[in-house]
Amino acid sequence: MMRTALAVVVSVLMAHAAAAQAVTVQDATAPDPDDQPLPVRIWYSGTLTNGAPRPLIVISHGTGGSLAGHTDTAHALAGAGFVVVSVSHTGDNYRDQSYVGRGLHLIGRPRHVSRVIDYMLTTWAERRRIDPTRIGVFGHSAGGFTALVLAGGEPDTSRGETHCLARPDAWDCTYLRQHGFNFANAPRVSPSAWHHDARIRAAVIAAPAVGYAFAPKGLSRVTIPIQLWVAGQDTVVDDSPAIIKGLLPRRPDYRLVQRAGHLSFITPCSREEAAIASVASKNGALNWCTDPDEFNRTVFHNEFNAAVTAFFAKTLGRSRGLDNGQVH
């Protein structure tokens, strides 16, 4: 029995090692003419040069997060034949939250994703291997809000003041105060001024934040397929996911994870992630290496990554796997 168990463990470790070797990871910078250049990380499997064009997935992290925050999900998607790219949002990442106090941390996010798509389609060395008609977005927390705006959502951030007056102890309201934000000095952005991108054909949003910013018709133009993940023990986004679910004109692929917390959708913490989370928590952000008691993030992510991959394969066109570096 012991030898059998050991053999199983060795086989699993070898399989993980082979999968890791099969995924190429690149760091690059996408230009943003309206602001600072955007750090990005790219994942893909096999050899791109001879394969058919692949779908592209862009990952948008949450407030105070990192482009490494969803590495295991990126690996899973890359292994299934997608090209994946994550972005570090200017002024709203674990190193720099300077835009939060000025009320600018949400406004630029949709544009950042579009600039990354521009880079991947026009500048990246392997750009010809991307199918521009099959682009999706994965967003967690504020990244979920970002995905909804890109898909046609029109938020009204002035609604945040009413939210914080009614719920001053809400996590996002406390976070804003910690960074010196004052609604009286907040930039006024009309709902129709937000950046949308018609190239995006599907989105996965996990524990989406700032749902209160959408008026009753604020999501009426979001008609792309949506997979919506909700954490049953989420103490960060309050009822935002429920608001969003109720406003979407097309029924989402709804996934409630009863025992999960807000941070449970972030990759199980490696040393890199633990170090990043520690730095972020000192600046008032959440330590995303924590979960509710008895919740096993590693086990959950096996199911989560498989479901996310299946959703994008269904909505963006199925990839039947990799064979000698080619996607079929």
Image (cartoon, rainbow, N blue to C red):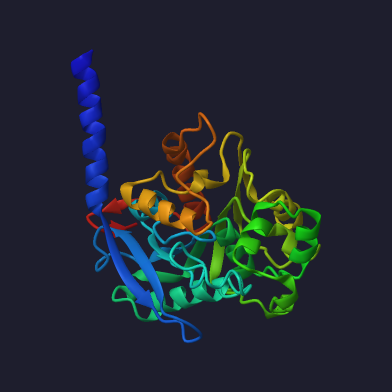
- In the rendered image, the residue lying farthest to the top is 1
Whole-percent x and y of residue 103?
63, 72
Pick the quarter of the image with the N terminus: top left
Whole-percent x and y of residue 49?
24, 69
Tell me if residue 302 comes above or below residue 266 in the rendering: above
106 sits left or right of 288 in the view: right
**Residue 214 in view of the camera:** no
Residue beneath the point at 46% across and 38% down: 297
Q: Quadrant of residue 57?
A: bottom left
In the image, 146 versus 219, the foreground residue is 146
Residue beneath the point at 22% across and 18% down: 4
- In the rendered image, the residue lying farthest to the bottom is 33
Whole-percent x and y of residue 70?
43, 53
Pick the quarter of the image with the C terminus: bottom left
Label total for image: 0
229 sits left or right of 127 in the view: right
Whole-percent x and y of residue 197?
57, 74
In the image, 81 versus 283, the foreground residue is 283
**Residue 23 in view of the camera:** yes
177 sits left or right of 321 in the view: right
